[in-house]
Amino acid sequence: MYACVALLTLLTIAADPTPEQLAKARANLVSEKPEVRRAAMKELIHSDLSPHLFPEMAAGLKDSDDDVRSIAATAIGNLGVKSESAIPALIAQMQDDKFKEARETAARALGRLGKAIPADRSAVKPLQKTAAEDADPVTRTVALGALAMMGEDLPGQVLGLRKFLSHDEALVRMKASHALGMIGLPAKSAAPEIVAVLEKETDSHRRGYVARALGNTGDPASLPALEKALKNETDAGAKGEIRGAIQKLKASP
């Protein structure tokens, strides 16, 4: 009983930040030092303060610092329905920002908001344009994934993402694999190509993402490649992702 009361107390505290906490966060978000603004915005990506600071987060999309704008888009995307009014600003950031990471995170945020607010389709055409024309292949890949999150022409997004699995840049191949993994079983046909991405990946962090994608796409034929990768893996985090993918595939009907 006492444990339940304690848990409820903690949840209440988490849901109701103090005025002092909010004041400190607001002050940090408008600090003259960009590193302070970056740190403050980053803390809001997963924070109980975020629902109370949406106006300040939205203002971050126009910050003079590239990283602050990029982080702000991620934080806003995580708020879901509460961030609907930020969609036009996110579209503008995706289309016009000179910093490619800011365009990428805006595209991802639009996908999350489109999934959370299915009636709002205002980001579909801008995302399609970004997927076709952005100068950065990572941003194009993320835009395709965002459209898939919104349920927009899923077969078309799978086809578009598969083209990036043979890209020259390893980061692009990983992002495409990750996006296909988020689609899940409808992207099962891409599993052999994702296996090829895993086999040539030299970065352990990226191998973890690619392995997770194989688990999510649900093709048991991926098991031998995953088991081989597990034997050769030296990174603990990647090992965990590979094991998780193997268990998921073995548990699939």
Image (cartoon, helix red, strand yellow):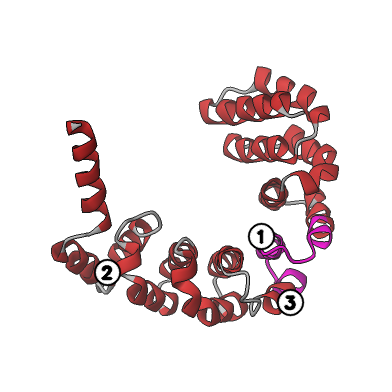
Q: Is residue 184 above or below residue 230?
A: below
Q: Which mark is residue 33?
A: 2
Q: Is residue 126 left or right of residue 63?
A: right
Dot 3 falls on a residue whose secondary structure is helix
Q: CA distance from mark 1 to mark 2?
A: 36 Å
Res 149 label: 1
Residue 32 in the image: state x and y as whole percent.
Answer: 25, 74
Span colored in magenta: 130-158
Note whether residue 34 is visible: no
**Looking at this rendering, what residue extends furthest in the front direction?**
1
Q: Is residue 233 above or below residue 150?
A: above
Q: Earlier in the sequence, mark 3 or mark 1?
A: 3
Query: Residue 129, labelled with which disc?
Result: 3
Q: Are marks 1 and 2 in contact (CB under 8 Å)?
A: no
Q: Left or right of 201: which side holds 20? A: left
Tell me the kind of residue under disc 2.
Answer: Lys
Quadrant the C terminus occupies: top right
Is residue 240 in view?
A: yes
Circle 1 Cα neighbour tier, 10 Å, few/some/many (<14 / 14–19 / ≥20):
many
**In magenta stretch: residue 141:** yes
Could you tell me residue 183's position as x and y percent?
Answer: 71, 51
Between marks 3 and 2, how big is the CA–CA gap?
A: 35 Å
State yes or no: discs 3 and 2 in contact (Cβ < 8 Å): no
Residue at 58% of width from left, 25% of height from top? 239
Image quarter of residue 65: bottom left
